[in-house]
Image: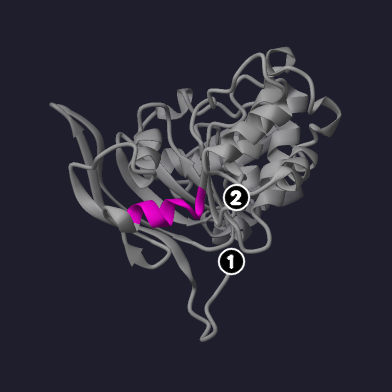
Amino acid sequence: MSTTDNGILEIVLEINNLTKYYGPVVAVEGLSLQIARGGVFGLLGPNGSGKTTTIGMVLGLVNPTRGSMRLFGQDVSGTTHRSALRRIGAMVESPAFYPYLSGRDNLRYFQGIGKGDGPQEVDQLLDLVDLSHRADSKYHTYSMGMKQRLGIAYAMLGDPELVFLDEPTNGLDPSGVAEVRDLIRRLGANGRTVVLSSHLLFEVEQVCDSVAILSRVRLITQGKVRDLLAQQDGVRLKATDQEEAQRILGTLKWVSGVRIENGYLVPEVPPERSGDLTKALSEQGVYVTEMSPVQISLERFFLEVTDDQVTSTLTEGVRS
């Protein structure tokens, strides 16, 4: 992330109390967040949580019911908003490319209506998204992964400072998912900010530096991914007698429960009480042979902060 000359974190997007109603339907409710310059920022939430609507309001495609926005430090409305949009790129859902034009000609077409500045840029972007070898093939012959990568190239026309990518790995096979994730990480370098909208927990955990978690059209929490997941979620252990250890731990009043994961016992206790676990077991002739910390996952963190079961739609995707 980038800072100003005096060391202050530079904010490229600030949203205050942003709300959108479609008649009686609430699409986004009182959303306030800040996105700093540089890196990859995740908008994480299940389908229907307001991610795409929020992006639409930032891009001027959707009129907010109330609230305000600042882009690159300026309040945006009217001509100010249009000026700020020249510094932004976006791929929202699937771009409407012409099926019988080549990838190269599609990008040149969009250059001609105000995005980008010359054939050299198109060649550089095709190389960036690894499509140089298929640049002159018709778009309709592209695989889903190639189409998504061309969409990212489209979003990069004009060398934008802020890029929005809405569910860029939808419909991809494992190889395509890995390629796009690697590309997104590279795009968030050198002071550029990438905002990744996703319902995939594993994707956000692997790719993003910071994240805002949305649930039921509201912001639940925001922060750096490493900070949100830094807390230790307890310990896991093996003992000389696993069955007896499980029974003993289950009788302790300060142990909330004991689960078994991959052959380990995982007692639900604060990490600082790991020594008490060892003592309680040894007093009854059972000894710990292995103990290690368990770090919280983004899935478990999401469940804790939302206190609901919407993770059924927040699939982990392909672990590649």
Residue 123 in the image: state x and y as whole percent.
78, 41
Instruction: Read off the magenta span.
Output: 81-88
Residue bearing the label numbered 2: 158
Image height check: is 72 above or below 313? below
Q: Residue at x 21, y 52 (%)?
A: 67
Q: Residue at x 70, y 24 (%)?
A: 145
Q: Is 147 placed left or right of 296 in the picture? A: right
> Which residue is situated farthest in the right direction here?
133
Residue 154 in the image: state x and y as whole percent.
61, 37
**Quarter assignment of residue 48:** top left
The secondary structure type at the circle numbered 1 is loop
Main SS, magenta residues: helix
Residue 217 in the image: state x and y as whole percent.
30, 36
Residue 201 or residue 130, whichever sits in front: 130
**Quarter assignment of residue 138:** top right
The mark total stands at: 2
- Amino acid beneath label 2: Gly
| Residue 53 part of the magenta-drawn span | no
Q: Residue at x 60, y 50 (%)?
A: 158
Residue bearing the label numbered 1: 1
Asked if the residue at tag 1 contacts the one at tag 2, i.e. Cβ–Cβ closer than 8 Å, the answer is: no
The quadrant the N terminus occupies is bottom right
Q: Residue at x 25, y 40 (%)?
A: 63
Residue 104, label in figure: none
Image height check: is 144 above or below 68? above
The quadrant the C terminus occupies is top right
Residue 271 in the image: state x and y as whole percent.
57, 57
First in sequence, mark 2 or 1: give its number: 1
